[in-house]
């Protein structure tokens, strides 16, 4: 299974970005999908996740500014980020739970990371 993340870049404060992460490979089903970020000198933290039953959860720091969504047909998870500030600067990683077969257990995969830089 491969995860291809995209959408990062340089954005001005109060700007917006939309991150995408597409899964490919041997996939029977997609389970939980989420976004994490890792800022310089800080541990990786959960930003948002969307479960297979469409339950979403967000870190307090992004509530009201970010929206996670998923397109199961496209095996893709998105993160719409608005009102960005310098504290959002980080490498963003997608994390997707995948079952390879009907009787397989769920295995989590990481995307390669996409850099978001918020700066004027």
Image: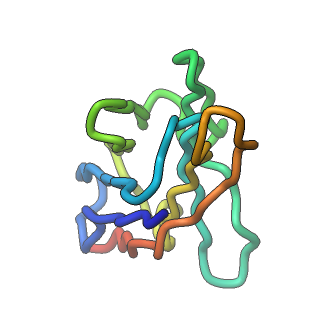
Relative image position of residue 110 (x, y in whole percent): 57, 65
Residue 96 shown left or right of residue 11 in the figure? right
Is 95 situated above or below 44? above
Report the side of 111 relative to 74 (left or right): right
Q: Residue at x 53, y 51 (%)?
A: 35
In the shown orientation, is residue 67 left or right of residue 91? left
Look at 55% across and 30% down and name the residue there: 50
Quadrant assignment, res 77: top left
Tell me where residue 89 appears, x and y as whole percent: 46, 69
Snapshot quadrant of residue 31: top right
Give the vertical position of 56 relative to 15 (above or below): above
Q: Residue at x 71, y 35 (%)?
A: 103
Q: Quadrant of the C terminus?
A: bottom left
Frontmost residue, 79 versus 12: 79
Colour mapping used in the image: rainbow
Q: How many marks?
A: 0
Q: Position of residue 47 (x, y in %)?
A: 59, 47
Query: Who is closer to the viewer here, 29 or 118?
Result: 29
Q: Position of residue 92 (x, y in %)?
A: 49, 65
Q: Residue at x 66, y 36 (%)?
A: 60
Q: Is residue 76 left or right of residue 97?
A: left
């Amino acid at each position: 299974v491969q995860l291809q993340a995209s959408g990062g870049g340089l954005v001005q404060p109060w700007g917006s970005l939309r991150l995408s992460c597409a899964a490919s490979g041997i996939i029977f089903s997609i389970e939980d999908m989420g976004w994490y970020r890792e800022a310089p000198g800080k541990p990786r933290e959960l930003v948002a996740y969307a479960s297979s039953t469409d339950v979403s959860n967000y870190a307090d720091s992004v509530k009201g500014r970010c929206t996670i969504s998923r397109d199961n047909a496209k095996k893709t998870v998105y993160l719409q980020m608005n009102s960005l500030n310098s504290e959002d600067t980080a490498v963003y990683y997608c994390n997707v739970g995948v079952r390879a077969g009907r009787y397989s257990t769920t295995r989590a995969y990481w995307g390669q990371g996409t850099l978001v830089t918020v700066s004027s």
